[in-house]
Image (tube, rainbow, N blue to C red):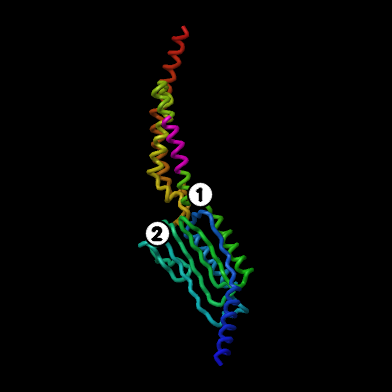
């Protein structure tokens, strides 16, 4: 009797393992993304629609249903957690958020799980289920839609970009200043000045926000539109600097030309 129970248990356990092996998972890494809340909502609605179509069997749902669907926005104390895939109209959504995760889980369904995790350091889409063709189709469609909003960003871009630009500006600053002081070539004074301004901007500008690996915005996600006042102010500063430097360069060039003519005589 004990032997029969043990054999039955082993058969059931082996059957469960075989069933578990049928689960297929497709994981896709996404590029840096900058997207508006409107476009993000469209992607989430499309994902929910694709999942609903894939899991509909002759218009009937599976007999055993355990469906969970959650949407999380932001990080830390400002995090918003929503049941479902739609941002409520009365929710206090921030002007910009740098993390979003969407989770869908339906037991016994052809496409049983979808996980979308979008953050500064990682952006990953994972779709699972026994229906291999549906899993591949849904993951490919969502990857294509999200990749349309790809942008330059991420921790690697910020780190290596700042390192390279800072190194180049430091070399230009040192060489330009040495040229102006040792050779008395003051007409090249703009080189160290603009190099110094560039180095200051590396520490002043919000590079983590500008080159975020993921960001979702209310309104237009374009950098030029969102930072139009700051860009205008920077242009004003450059204009003022040039208004002082251009006459200085012309005066230095005139003196150098006059000195060369005098020596020639």
On the image, the x and y values in percent for residue 189 come to 41, 27
Q: Which picture quadrant has residue 56?
A: bottom right
Looking at the image, residue 55 lies above or below residue 195: below
On the image, the x and y values in percent for residue 113 come to 53, 70
Q: Main secondary structure of the magenta part?
A: helix
In reply to whether residue 167 is colored magenta, the answer given is yes
Helix, strand or loop status at disc 1: loop
For the residue pair 3 and 43, the one nearer the viewer reads as 3
Name the outermost residue toward the left: 77
Name the outermost residue toward the bottom: 1
Helix, strand or loop status at disc 2: loop
Q: Residue at x 47, y 55 (%)?
A: 121
Q: Which picture quadrant has residue 28?
A: bottom right
Crowding near pointer 1: few (<14 within 10 Å), some, many (20+)?
Answer: some
The range drawn in magenta is 162-174
Q: Residue at x 40, y 59 (%)?
A: 94
Residue at image mark 1: 152
Residue at image mark 2: 94
Crowding near pointer 2: few (<14 within 10 Å), some, many (20+)?
Answer: some
Looking at the image, residue 160 lies above or below residue 20: above
Q: Residue at x 41, y 57 (%)?
A: 95
In reply to whether residue 117 is colored magenta, the answer given is no
């Amino acid at each position: 009797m004990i032997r029969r129970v043990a054999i039955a248990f082993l058969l059931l356990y082996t059957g469960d393992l075989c069933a578990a092996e049928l689960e297929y998972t497709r994981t896709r890494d996404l590029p840096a993304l900058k997207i508006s809340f409107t476009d993000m909502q469209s992607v989430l609605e499309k994902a929910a629609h694709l999942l609903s179509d894939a899991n509909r069997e002759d218009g009937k749902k599976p007999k055993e249903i355990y469906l969970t669907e959650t949407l999380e926005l932001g990080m830390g104390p400002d995090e918003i957690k929503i049941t479902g895939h739609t941002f409520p109209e009365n929710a206090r959504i921030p002007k910009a958020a740098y993390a979003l995760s969407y989770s869908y889980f339906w037991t016994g369904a052809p496409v049983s799980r979808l996980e979308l995790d979008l953050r500064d350091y990682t952006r990953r889409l994972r779709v699972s289920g026994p229906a291999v063709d549906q899993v591949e189709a849904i993951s490919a469609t969502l990857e294509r839609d999200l990749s349309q909003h790809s942008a330059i960003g991420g921790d690697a871009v910020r780190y290596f970009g700042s390192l390279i630009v800072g190194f180049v500006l430091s070399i230009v600053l040192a060489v330009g200043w040495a040229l102006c002081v040792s050779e008395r070539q003051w007409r090249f004074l703009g080189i160290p000045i603009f190099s110094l301004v560039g180095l200051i901007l590396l520490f002043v500008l919000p590079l983590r926000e500008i080159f975020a690996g993921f960001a979702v915005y209310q309104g237009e996600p374009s950098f030029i539109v969102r930072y139009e006042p700051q860009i205008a102010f920077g242009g004003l500063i450059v204009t003022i600097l040039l208004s002082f430097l251009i006459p200085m360069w012309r005066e230095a060039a005139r003196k150098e030309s006059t000195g060369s003519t005098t020596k020639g005589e």
